[in-house]
Amino acid sequence: MRPEVVVWLVRDSCRLQDNPALVRAAELARATGAGLVPLVCLEPRRWADQQFGLSRIGSHWARFRIQALLELESALNFEDSALWISADEPDRALELIQEHMRVIHVVTDLPLATEERLENAKLESEGYLLSAVETNDLFRAAQLPFDLDELPSTFTQFRKTIERAPALLPPLPQAQPVLPPLPAQPWARPSEWHEAVLAVTQPSRSSMEGGRTPSLAHWHRYLEAKALSHYKLTRNAFEGLHQSSELSAGLAHGCLSAREIWHDTLAYESRVGANESTYWLRFELLWREYFRWYSRASDWTLFRRTGPADRSVAGDFQATRFRAWSDGSTGCDIVDAAMRELLATGWMSNRARQLVASHCIYESGLDWRLGAAWFESQLIDHDVASNWGNWAYIAGVGPDPRGGRVFNLDQQASRYDPNATYRDRWLVS
């Protein structure tokens, strides 16, 4: 008789600590006397040129994710568990497990967008019991004072609704569950995994390292430097140590939990003192949270030209203008500097992202989705909700009642890079 197992399908939650999906999987395994299989699918669809001819992810994202998975594997091995790895779609990976064990339940993250939702639906249609858990969100759906189809149409309405409910707080971080022992996977690891691990050893200009340990160490250094106390004043800087929090990559790959960060800021305020800056980091976490629920509510409409707002907008796919924008040769120095930083490192500041998006849509005259797809192919911290939600917002087809955001690029460059230090650094590179 094949042993029974619960499968924890790892998506964007590369950690054992404060992981509600893993906690739920461990509870189910314990209650049924089943084993627990942590499974990651490298999802070859992400590596294909499916989006306007662009790769779904870039080398910087892939490097960070593999580093995060290597650390997750090490943490699981320490608990006498293991990380099983497949290069197939989840349904095929589960078929491989079924050849050796009987899968009685699958637990994974609550989908952010259409593809993951359809993947889950396919698994359920094939007879798998599946639980989708709010793993990387601040709040559980049951906590929100509105149904998903009644999500406030703007962030301001969302934020005020949340903040007016004094008892509405993110749950406290959950402890790491006890995991049952698990042998090594019964099939050979795919070549895609070995190639990706080898690529991690190659030189990189990115200073960001994937995994919970480096992500948490970065956050602790930021707090120890008391940089949180000036976060609002410096967060729009294009570069500089501790100017912004630079938490996005750790959050996007699930090395960190947004709930951890939220409660850490409250502890910081108790220890060091509260001000507008300490509040503002939670304000930005609420922005991230809003886009997560907005993506779920919008589903496929987030990816259409007219966006969730169903507004007609201009923009085309002209190759020469796109090439100039994407490789940083538009002639607008602040845009070109930021785009070259993105190519080299997979990163640019939040302010720079808004400026290059404005240029893409309103100066270069490109379809906003082409810009969003390019970011998806390049960003080290790409997550579908924040990236596509922000692009839709700038384009005026998302949750912006003003119908889009057009920036004065010269004015912005003078304000945030007055000595042209940032521009000089990347335009001569």
Image: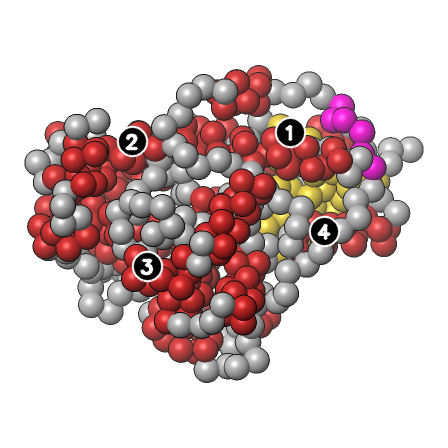
Tell me the tag on residue 343.
2
Q: How many marks can you see?
A: 4
Q: Is residue 245 above or below residue 10?
A: below
Question: Residue beneath label 1, please?
Answer: 85
Dot 1 crowding, Cα within 10 Å, few <14, some 14–19, many 20+: many
- Give the Cα separation between the discs numbered 3 and 2: 29 Å
Asked if disc 1 and disc 3 are in contact, CB closer than 8 Å, the reply is no
Drawn side of residue 208 relative to residue 116, left or right = left
Question: Residue beneath label 4, please?
Answer: 176
Seen at 55% across and 62% down, the residue is 264
Q: Secondary structure at mark 4?
A: loop
The residue under label 1 is which amino acid type? Ile
- The span shown in magenta is 181-186
In this rendering, the label closer to the viewer, 1 or 3:
1
Q: Is residue 30 above or below residue 201?
A: below
Seen at 16% across and 35% down, the residue is 424
Seen at 69% across and 49% down, the residue is 22
- Give the Cα separation between the discs numbered 3 and 4: 38 Å
Q: Quadrant of residue 307?
A: bottom left
Question: Residue beneath label 3, please?
Answer: 308
First in sequence: mark 4 vs mark 1: 1
First in sequence: mark 3 vs mark 2: 3
**Along the line of sight, which residue is nearer the eye, 114 or 357?**
357
